[in-house]
Amino acid sequence: MKVSVLSRLAAVIVVGALIAGCANTIRGVGRDTANAVDATQNAGRNISRAAE
């Protein structure tokens, strides 16, 4: 019975670590997307200023 409880606990810990890793990846993608949008907007402003 102890092995079963320890196995379940280990499985819960592994799943928790995987979920935490996915959350960090999703946050990173969000930051990368925001940075890409900012860079695109800045490039548009630079082109607009150059055209004046």
Image (cartoon, rainbow, N blue to C red):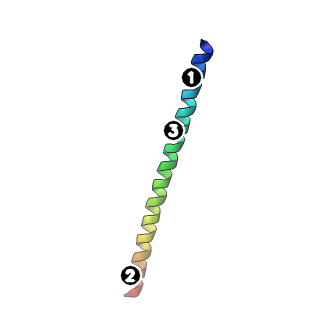
The residue lying furthest to the right in this view is 3
- Residue 8's disc number: 1
Q: Please name whichever residue, 42 or 4, is drawn nearer the observer in this view of the structure.
A: 4
User: What residue would you read off at disc 3?
Assistant: 19
What's the mark number on residue 48? 2
Q: In what quadrant of the picture does the C terminus appear?
A: bottom left
Q: How many marks?
A: 3
Specify the quadrant that holds the N terminus.
top right
8 to 21, vertically: above or below: above
SS for dot 3: helix
Q: Is residue 34 above or below residue 18?
A: below
Q: Position of residue 31 (x, y in %)?
A: 46, 56
Q: Quadrant of residue 12?
A: top right
Q: Looking at the picture, how far across and down is residue 42, in whole percent?
A: 42, 72
Of the two numbered discs 2 and 3 in the rendering, the one whose residue sits closer to the viewer:
3
Give, as a three-letter code, the residue at label 3. Ile
Q: Residue at x 39, y 82 (%)?
A: 49
Residue 9 occupies quadrant: top right
Q: Is residue 6 left or right of residue 28?
A: right
User: Which amino acid does the dot numbered 2 rest on?
Assistant: Ser
Q: Residues within 10 Å of mark 2 (few under 14, many from 20)?
A: few
Residue 46 % position (x, y): 42, 78
Name which quarter of the figure residue 2 lies in.
Answer: top right
Q: Counting residues from the N terminus, which is met first, the one under dot 3 or under dot 1?
A: 1
In screen coordinates, is 3 left or right of 44? Answer: right
Crowd tier of the residue under label 1, counting other residues whose Cα lies within 10 Å: few below 14, some 14–19, many 20 or above: few
Task: Name the amino acid, label 1.
Answer: Arg
User: Could you say which is closer to the camera, residue 48 or residue 29?
Assistant: 29
At x 49%, y 54%, the residue is 29
The CA distance from mark 2 to mark 3 is 44 Å
